Image (cartoon, rainbow, N blue to C red):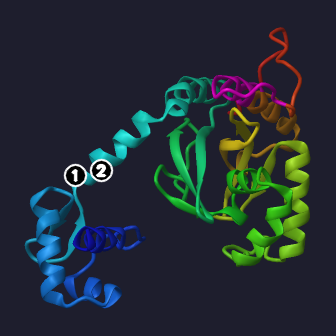
Amino acid sequence: MKTLDTALKLLRLFDTDEQTLSVTEIAEASGLPKSKVSRLLAVFRTNGFLEQDELTRRYRIGLAAFELGSNYVKSQPIAHEALPVMRQIVEQTGHSTTLTVMRGELVLHLLAVEGPHYIDGRWRVGNRLPYFATSAGKVLVAGMDPELIAGFIARHPPTAITPATVTDPEALRRQLAEVRRAGMSITRGESAPGLAAIAVPVLGRFAQTVAALGLVIPDRLFDTAEVPSLVALLHTEGRRLSIKCGAADYPYSPPPDRSAPAPRHIA
């Protein structure tokens, strides 16, 4: 079991922004002899979880790891329920939509549907983003037990990513309190310049926040006059997903009025 634990820890080293790692880099990061690292990496390579470049001899994630990760998404009931909802949001707004969960102090986009107004940013599926600079992250942290939030911020203090990032812990705590009250968060340029986002919570069986449903909007197309209708749309669909996840209530909006006009498509 010790060898298995060691091998899995080596594999976790590839959970990084670096696309490839060398045997030397892995040995230095793990504190293991290069000979042992080479043997373990060879096992992962043989089984398809890692690939090795024939020229550079550096390792990267293999197809088997991708397939395993894809099966995780497929096995999540919320993913099956969310995908048609997200497509409908894209059709109504023209903007990309995301379903996001927490992983430690980082947020991870579990699903995304790109809209015609898509711009490349740091929000792609599988990307890990800081909770304090994203609308989805703020929704997810705001959904924690209020007594735990201050300690969470103290353990994971905000740092500047862009000039718009909120870096004062007390200001962030107040902001999260407002996000919890309103059931929504809006960010503009906090994690990437030129990118705005809106997110609302998805609740589970015990009224806990299990995910965030969000829109990603090019800042040049962000119209404050559109915000109320976009938030209403997200709340309507967030309510639908929450009920499917077992939530008894969704306190952030009244039951949807099917006669109300949909948000106009932003051209």
Q: Secondary structure at mark 2?
A: helix
Magenta stretch: give its range: 236-250
Q: Is residue 209 above or below residue 254?
A: below
Q: Which mark is residue 52?
A: none
Whole-percent x, y for residue 44 in the image: 17, 64
Q: Please state, as top left, top right, bottom left or bottom right, where the N terminus lies in the image.
A: bottom left
Whole-percent x, y for residue 134 in the image: 69, 58
Q: Nearer the viewer, residue 200 or 194?
A: 200
Pointer 2 residue: 66
> Residue 125: within the magenta?
no
In which quarter of the view is residue 156 placed? bottom right
Q: Amino acid at mark 1?
A: Leu
Sort mark 2 into few (<14), some (14-19) or many (20+) by Cα contacts within 10 Å.
some
Pointer 1 residue: 63
Q: Is residue 259 above or below residue 17?
A: above
Inspect this view and state whether residue 56 appears. Answer: no
Q: Main secondary structure of the magenta part?
A: helix
Q: Kindly indicate whether the residue at mark 1 contacts the one at mark 2 (C-beta within 8 angstroms).
A: yes
For the point 59% across and 63% down, the residue is 104
Q: Secondary structure at mark 1?
A: helix
Horizontal arrangement in the rendering, residue 69 relative to residue 3 (left or right): right
Inspect this view and state whether residue 234 appears. Answer: yes
Whole-percent x, y for residue 144 in the image: 76, 54
For the point 42% across and 34% down, the residue is 75
Whole-percent x, y for residue 178 in the image: 91, 53
Sort mark 1 into few (<14), some (14-19) or many (20+) by Cα contacts within 10 Å.
some
Q: Amino acid at mark 2?
A: Phe
